[in-house]
Image: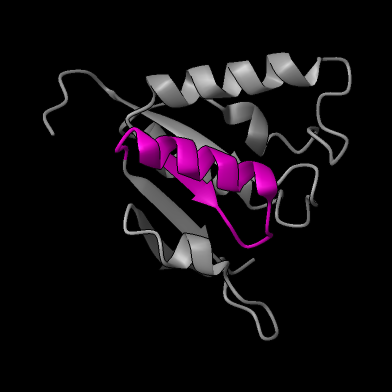
Amino acid sequence: MKIHHPMRFYFSACITGGRDQAHIYPRIIEYPKQYGEVLTTFVADNAHTQLGEQQAPPESVYQRDIDYINQCDVLLTEVTIPSFGVGVEVAHAGIQGKPVLALCQPAEGRRLSTMIAGDPNVTVTEYRILE
């Protein structure tokens, strides 16, 4: 795949299913910013709560996110906390043949979704952030 522009990254992470990892998201998106644009920095905003975007109709949020996935070169997702929305985003990117990098913090008693782990379009990488 030859890219003639700065990379465009779609960052995806759990929102309505829990924001327990949200404090880590700003640190995660710093790396791809060195190579291009992160289209969805709002996902990493600590002010973005579990309530999500209550003022926006679900259809407009869905369409906006699909449009961003259509524009991105790579989907970067944090999958430590399971999320139906993240699963839909990963599937949509996969249908388009876009590479997906899924980051996961290992923890005892927690298991990564087999649909994410088994998807040949998804590269799963475990990570640890020492605070």
**Can residue 26 be seen at all in this image of the molecule?**
no
Name above or below for residue 38 compared with residue 120: above
- Horizontal side of residue 52 vs 94, given as left or right: right
Q: Quadrant of residue 73?
A: top left
Picture coordinates of residue 82 (x, y %)? 68, 58
Picture coordinates of residue 77 (x, y %)? 51, 47
Let me know if residue 108 is in the magenta part: no
**Can residue 97 be seen at all in this image of the molecule?**
yes
Let me know if residue 81 is in the magenta part: yes
Position of the C terminus, as image quadrant, is: bottom right
Picture coordinates of residue 30 (x, y %)? 47, 40
Q: Quadrant of residue 52?
A: top right
- Extreme residue in the bottom direction: 108
Name above or below for residue 16 compared with residue 68: below
- Horizontal side of residue 80 vs 36, given as left or right: right
Say which residue appears at 65% left-offset and 34% top-offset. 43
Magenta-drawn segment: 75-98
Say which residue appears at 41% left-offset and 21% top-offset. 70
Say which residue appears at 62% left-offset and 62% top-offset. 80
Tag count in the figure?
0
Q: Nearer the viewer, residue 23 or 112?
A: 112
